[in-house]
Image: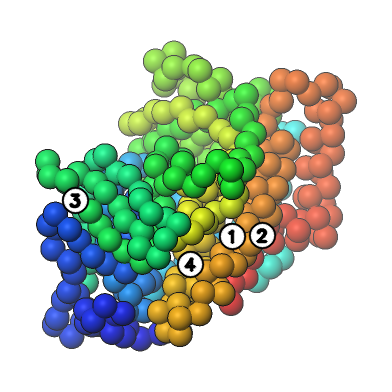
């Protein structure tokens, strides 16, 4: 059970949102004060702010984009059961439970056939398909309902004094400069944000693998092609079919990351999807009206350490995974779960031991997920540098994970994620 809200360390009362009151937050002025300053209103920043509120800890979230933009940017969302359990336990999972699609397994398509990985039978756990921007909507609504402080449209963000006990964040909001004084700064501002670069290069080491291919993504108005996700390996390249809702589908296929969506007509896209996914026994992708197209590059990235002084990194600010393993959002949730516990311990007892071990604890899960995502990516994609011998090894690996219960269980355990207590 999550702890009941309590009085914050600076004397500002935090109360349950259902008792008719509202959370007291600092007003925006030339000088602001809070306990935890959070940069970035993505899933990591918003969920952390929400969890801290439930623990009676003040936070202010700063976001460069507008609310409408963060709530409408379409990104995939395969949620591990540990993620859905936390969202439900913290009171923001009602819409996810009603509208999300619970999947007990997924299919691997190769050599003209499909084979199913039964997640529920192999692990006792499932995944839920619920788009990331829908998670963001739920978290923003929860913070607004609680009177939480989220400042959208900020600019010129910089972090100061992280080596001291009094760090601060400087920023511009609505044309005025402000300083947010806080006990801790949490960087949840993604791979292009300012937080990671605030950690001195002498204490930071970055690890990266850029892949020579990307994903061409489409959103489709139409009926589902299958009850569960389909991961397809074809000599022409990888493809993925994901059901977003009974009437909207999300699909991807491997492409040149420098290609343009303007080079792909709808007819050409459907021909490619059919070639890569349709099975020899007549199971076919269902065509529909394509209403969005985009191309995304792919890379693996980890920055260590994830903390320095009073600055902590979470989510994409510290690590990126290729989407093949469906780990990005789930890793962000894992990070903030660890951080929220560490901050709770600090404000309860003054003990900083859990915060001091944050990087160590988080990176254990991160490197495991990085390896799984890399393995899935190498197994499922067309690799231009792979010899015919290596291409046959990909098929052999797929045969192994779909015929050996031990191999299938290992794959399923990695896919549904670690059990978090």
Foreground of the two, 186 or 370? 186
Q: Rounded to the nearest whole Å, what is the CA distance between mark 1 and mark 2?
A: 9 Å
First in residue order: circle 1 vs circle 3: 3
Residue 364 circle label: 2
Discs 4, 1 touching: Cβ within 8 Å: no
Residue 359 circle label: 1
Q: Rounded to the nearest whole Å, what is the CA distance between mark 3 and mark 2?
A: 37 Å
Between marks 3 and 4 in the image, the one whose residue lies nearer the viewer: 3
Residue drawn at x 36%, y 58% is 167
State whether residue 379 is above or below residue 160: above
State whether residue 285 is above or below residue 140: above
Relative to 117, is 402 on the left or the right? right
First in residue order: circle 2 vs circle 4: 4
Residue drawn at x 44%, y 17% is 260
First in residue order: circle 3 vs circle 2: 3
Q: Residues within 10 Å of mark 3 (few under 14, many from 20)?
A: some
Q: Residues within 10 Å of mark 2 (few under 14, many from 20)?
A: few
Q: Which residue is mark 4?
A: 339
Secondary-structure class at tag 4: helix
């Amino acid at each position: 059970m999550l702890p009941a809200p309590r009085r914050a360390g600076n004397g500002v009362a935090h109360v349950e949102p259902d008792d008719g009151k509202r959370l007291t937050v600092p007003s925006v002025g030339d000088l602001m004060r809070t306990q935890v300053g959070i940069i970035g209103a993505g899933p990591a920043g918003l969920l952390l702010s929400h969890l801290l509120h439930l623990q009676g800890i003040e936070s202010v979230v700063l976001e460069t984009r507008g609310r409408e933009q963060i709530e409408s940017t379409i990104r995939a969302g395969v949620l591990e059961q540990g993620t859905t359990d936390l969202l439900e336990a913290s009171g923001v999972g009602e819409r996810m439970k009603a509208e999300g699609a619970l999947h007990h397994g997924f299919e691997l398509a190769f050599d003209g056939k499909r084979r199913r990985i039964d997640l529920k039978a192999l692990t006792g756990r499932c995944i839920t398909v619920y788009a990331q921007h829908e998670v963001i909507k739920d978290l923003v609504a929860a913070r607004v309902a609680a009177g939480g402080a989220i400042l959208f449209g900020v600019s010129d963000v910089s972090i100061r004094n992280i080596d001291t006990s009094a760090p601060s964040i400087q920023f511009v909001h609505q044309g005025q400069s402000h300083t947010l004084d806080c006990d801790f700064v949490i960087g949840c501002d993604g791979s292009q944000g300012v937080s990671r670069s605030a950690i001195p290069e002498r204490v930071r080491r970055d690890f990266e693998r850029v892949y020579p291919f990307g994903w061409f993504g489409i959103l489709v108005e139409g009926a589902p092609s299958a009850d569960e996700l389909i991961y397809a390996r074809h000599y022409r390249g990888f493809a993925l079919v994901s059901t977003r809702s009974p009437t909207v589908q999300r699909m991807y296929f491997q492409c040149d990351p420098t290609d343009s969506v303007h080079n792909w007509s709808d007819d050409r896209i459907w021909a490619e999807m059919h070639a890569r996914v349709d099975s020899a026994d007549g199971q076919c992708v269902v065509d529909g009206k394509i209403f969005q197209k985009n191309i995304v590059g792919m890379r693996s990235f980890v920055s260590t350490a994830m903390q320095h002084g009073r600055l902590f990194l979470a989510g994409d600010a510290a690590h990126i995974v290729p989407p093949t393993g469906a780990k990005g959002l789930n890793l962000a949730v894992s990070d903030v779960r660890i951080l929220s516990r560490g901050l709770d311990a600090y404000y309860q007892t003054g003990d900083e031991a859990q915060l001091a071990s944050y990087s160590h604890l988080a990176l254990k899960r991160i490197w495991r997920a990085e390896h799984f995502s890399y393995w899935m990516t190498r197994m499922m994609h067309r690799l231009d540098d792979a010899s015919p011998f290596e291409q046959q090894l990909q098929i052999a690996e797929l045969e192994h994970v779909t015929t050996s219960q031990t191999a299938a269980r290992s794959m399923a355990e990695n896919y549904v994620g670690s059990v978090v207590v």
